[in-house]
Amino acid sequence: MKNFVWLAAALLLLSFVYPNGPTLPVTPAVAPDGPTDSTILKILEKAQAEDKGRIRDVYSALATVLKRDKLKPPARITTTEQWADLQANTLQLAIDTPGEYPGLDEAIETVFKTTVGTDDVLPSNDDTRNKLISACEIISNTASR
């Protein structure tokens, strides 16, 4: 019983020292081959590795969500308007310090507009979905550099 009390005391002490748990060092990812965007690359030139990693991971995950949405009918993202809502809501939850890199939001929107070809509402067919996935991959590849 005495050992159990010591263990509980040690865990309590650790919870005060590390209230959110211990943090592990961020290891830089190997830059993948693929297209990048020069504007985003310039904006993120002096960004911290942690911030680049978060952007890379968010857009990599969004590309995965788009791929899975096609594979598991019925599709949940049926228009580019729904895609824009998904992207905006994801960024609100995932990004801790919005506005830290001025112009990044506009550069990301430009990648989507350039890749998709318009900012009008389009149905989410295979062609549109592939363009959205491609734009996500461009942003993810750029943040990996």
Image (tube, rainbow, N blue to C red):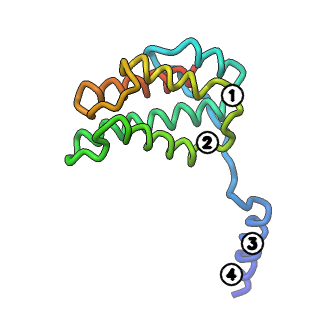
Q: Mark 1 vs mark 4: which is more N-terminal? A: 4
Q: Amino acid at mark 3?
A: Leu
Q: Residue at x 76, y 76 (%)?
A: 9
Labels 4 and 2: the sequence-earlier one? 4
Mark 1 residue crowding within 10 angstroms, few (<14) / some (14–19) / many (20+): some
Q: Does residue 136 lie above or below 22 as drawn?
A: above
Residues 34 and 90: in front is 90
- The disc placed on residue 12 is 3
Q: Secondary structure at mark 2?
A: loop
Q: Amino acid at mark 1?
A: Tyr
Mark 4 and mark 2: Cα distance apart in space: 40 Å
Badge nearest the viewer, 4 or 2: 2
* Residue that label 2 marks: 95
Write the residue at 69% across / 58% down. Answer: 20
The tag earlier along the polypeptide, 3 or 2, is: 3
Residue topped by disc 1: 101
* Secondary structure state at the residue bearing disc 1: loop
Residue on which the image places disc 4: 4
Q: Quadrant of residue 24?
A: top right
